[in-house]
Image: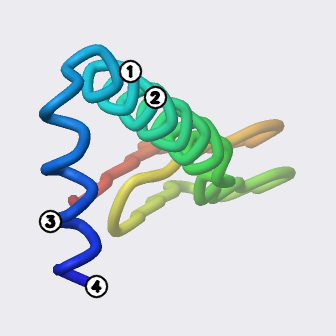
Amino acid sequence: MSALVNLTVGMLTQKWNWAWLACSIVLVVLGVALQMWLTKTDGLPQRRQVFEDVEGKSLQQRMKGAGDQRVTRAKVEGSLRQTQDD
């Protein structure tokens, strides 16, 4: 395999136009692959912690790591405390 790479590189460097074309094609393909990978990983669902229809004197919501915390339709007489640890 290394002999084939060595032979190909040697042939391409004798004709620099082909070498630049091959290099450009490789860079474009790598850029497209990286962009597709980044786009795919951006769409991962985030963790969510939701409290709904809660009643009480106080409410504490705690979550470890990244994500979204939400409290909806809650009747809390005392304190509402949300913490998130990374």
The amino acid type of the residue labelled 4 equals Met
Residue at image position (61%, 39%) is 36
In this rendering, does residue 28 appear at all? Answer: yes
Marks 1/3: CA distance?
Answer: 18 Å
Q: Does the CB distance between marks 2 and 3 fall below 8 Å?
A: no
Label 1's element? helix
Mark 2 / mark 3, whichever is N-terminal: 3
Whether residue 68 is visible to the viewer of this picture, yes or no, is no
**Amino acid type, callout 2:** Ile
How would you rate the neighbour count of disc 4 (Cα within 10 Å): few for under 14, some for 14-19, many for 20 or more?
few
Q: In the image, which disc is placed on residue 25?
A: 2
> Residue beneath label 4, please?
1
Between residues 64 and 15, which one lies in front from this camera angle?
Answer: 15
Say left or right for 86 vs 34. Answer: left
> Which of these two is toward me, 31 or 11?
11
Give residue 52's position: percent from left, percent from top. 81, 51
Mark 2 vs mark 4, foreground winner is 4
Q: Which residue is mark 1?
A: 21
Mark 1 or 3, closer to the camera? 3
Distance from disc 2 to disc 3, alpha carbons, whole Å, reads 19 Å
Under circle 4, the secondary element is loop
Residue of label 3: 6
Residue 77 location, x and y as percent?
Answer: 58, 42
